[in-house]
Image: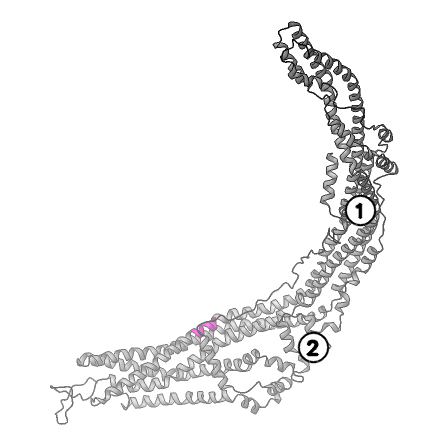
Amino acid sequence: MGYLLFFFTLALVFPDPAQLQPCSSESPSLVLRFEDVGADQRILAHHRSPGAMDPLYSLVQSYLDVVQQNSFPTDLLRDALKDPPSASTSQILQYQTGYIICATIAVVYFVSVPVIGLSICCCRRRRRCGGRIKAYRRSLICKRNLLMLCLLLTTLFKLAGVICAFAANQKVKEEMEPGTRDALHTLQAVRHHVNGIPQGVQRAVDQFAVPKEQILHDLNNVGWSIGSTIQLVLKGTVYSAMAAMKGRVQDLQNSLHHLQTLNMTVRALIRYQGDLEPALKDRKRSITSLLHHPQCAYCLSVLSRAESLELGANYRKVPSVERVLKTLHGLPKANFTEMIHQANRTFNSIPQLTEKKMEEVVRDLKAEIEKATRKIQSIADGFPILDHTRPMNDALIKAENSSRPYLKEVKHYERYRWIIGVIACTVILLIVFCNLLGLALGTYGLAVREDPSDYESRGEAGAKLLLTGVGFSFLFSWILILLVFGTFLVGGNVQTLLCKHWANQEIYKFIDTPGNLPPSMNISQHLGLKKNLNITTAYQQCKNGAGFWEVLHLEDRYNLNEHLSIAKYTTEFQKRLAHFHTRFEEIVLLNAEGRKDLETFRDSQIDQIDYAAFAAEIRNPVVQTNVEGLAGDLERLSTVQSDRTLAERLADEAKKLKKIQNMTVLMMEVLVEKLKESIQFLSTMALDLQDLINSTESQIGHAETIIPLESQKILRQELSCFERKEMGYISQYLNWLRSVLTEDVASCQPFSTALDNSRVILCDRITDAWNAFWFSLGGCTFFLIPSIFFAIKTTKHFRPIRHRLVSTGSEETYPFHIPRVTSLRL
């Protein structure tokens, strides 16, 4: 029974083959993971971090836009590049009109300020300027305060400007050294990227090992996998058929057992019935005669039970099963256990059998994969990008070697530039200090004017400090204007001629315009391209992540689609799979002898036995009355009889009844229960016997028919699934290889990043700070002029008054008073 339940459980667990989808055992959904085989060198994009000086940078750029309003000098540059002597001076002067105007202003400043200073020195030497106020008037207070305020504002403006100049000067120093280093590193990074392209191409080709390893792994398991799938799909049908056959064999064995039991039980009951019937008659006659005895007390109550002492069932009337037993005699003749074991062994060996049958085709498929590996390697050998990266590498090496000494010189001269800038800023700061200290002392002197001695010393000191600042201004102004103009001319032209047009890509458009560059500078010719390279478009494509494949139009020389066509690598692989055919051994679930046994069982007419007659007869009791109860009643009657002889005879009859009960009736009742069990099984089984055997034969026939057909069908489905799966691996690799070769390994994004980084280093980080320096220092230099004027005018108010009017009554000055001459310290 346990074996039967096992088969039924399998039949319920495994679904019907029609309900299973193709390729259910292996889903082609595995996504391959490839290594990052891009160029070794990655170039990080540089950016200038936002800072507090950004508004100043914007102001300077706006100023330069006003100074240089001309567009990009295309004609001038074209003439200069093709034939430098042909670039006329008039063209250059016309383009540099704004700078010429600024140069004129600087020259005027350079000449006029020292001349004015010399003039003032001469006047001061003759005491014609910077003297004292000769008389005190109330109107002088407003003039004095206005002069002091203007001087303070110009001084504060110079202080703010010199602070900005100090900061910009230091910013240039901080950016210059890392800027030159970053520029050199950018060149090296681009060169390393170009040098890494061949190795990157080879590494990308070597990544074919990833799908190859997966395909070889699948090939090693494909036979077992397909066989297991066939077994899994057919397992429900086969096990269900074998379970049904096992059930019918079990039914046959159980039926034979119960038929034999029924036949022997009926015979035993008839034999016991033959012995019991005369014994009951004798006891009935004897007991009823005793109970009718006149002296028998209380005997009439038991008389009815004694009169029922006779057989209740007649087992000679039940149908005979001899004919059915004769038909089934000797069954089962077939060895069903060995038959089922053999079927199981054959069915369970399908994976091993499939694996063995596919050994040769698997070996051929592995050879095809090796051929595909060699074909993939040919891509690395023939990839055309190497022909174009060699000129790039040579140009980058030349640029790196030629720029290295210049970058070293930049570091060397940057120190001198920084020192000169610090000195210039210090001079401005010294002038600012003289002005502020002079204003402070002069203001203090005015506050204590009532004390002549203290007033004169403080006021005189303030006036001298202001004149000292004026002297420094005249002394260094011409040097400052030279420094400002020199840095302005360099930084302004770098910004307006290079940085501005670099940012808006006017320079790229100039290069792209045919005829602007001499033949020696033609990039397309240097790279060996069939088409002219559009720098603007190439820059945008590189910036968006395109590769040299797209930018250099290499598809004109190398048909990548042909080399990356999946058919080139998988045609033979697919043919070998398509041509593979095999047959599976037939699984015999039921041989002819076993089938004959089942047919004999079905035709034995076991279902035509009159089980109702059996049931009707065994429902009757063996004896109509309860023999044991009657014996008990006779024993009780014997105890109440006055006639001792009658009492002994009643007791003797009771003992004889108990003997009949124990020796015969109980045995017959046990046999009746046994008979009931067999009748119940046979009657229940016989109801569906014909249908069960017919269904079993149909299941077995269906299983034996479907196994070879479904095996072939599943084999083709699984091979098709396997083919799609392996082709999917190769397709993933080829798509990845296409992307890597055209975008990643041969990416030109480092070139656009290098150009952007160069612009950021030169323009955003160095030139902006450079221009902020001369703009701040220039503002301070030009504000020296109003500072000189206000300082000289304010000096008179800080010195003691030559004639001071005194009134005892009030601060007012009267027209008719006699002035008192005060002693003056000259």
Circle 1: element type = helix
The image shows residue 211 at horizontal and vertical percentages of 72, 56
Front residue (pair 581, 699): 699
Quadrant assignment, res 140 = bottom left
Q: State how far apart marks 2 and 1 are (Cα).
A: 59 Å
Q: Which region of the structure is painted magenta?
A: 167-173
Magenta stretch: dominant SS?
helix
Labels 2 and 1 touching (C-beta < 8 A)? no
- Whether 268 is among the magenta residues is no
Residue at the extreme top: 644
Quadrant assignment, res 396 = bottom right
Front residue (pair 709, 665): 665
Q: Say what amino acid the circle numbered 1 marks.
A: Glu
Give the foreground label among 2 and 1.
1
Residue at image location 17% in from the left, 80% down from the top? 451
The image shows residue 785 at horizontal and vertical percentages of 37, 86
Could you tell me how many numbered marks the image carries?
Answer: 2
The N terminus sits in image quarter: top right
- Residue 355, labelled with which disc? 1
- Sequence-first tag of 2 and 1: 1
Front residue (pair 652, 402): 652
532 sits to left or right of 357: left
Q: Say what amino acid the circle numbered 2 marks.
A: Ser
482 sits to left or right of 393: left
- Whether 171 is among the magenta residues is yes
Front residue (pair 220, 294): 294
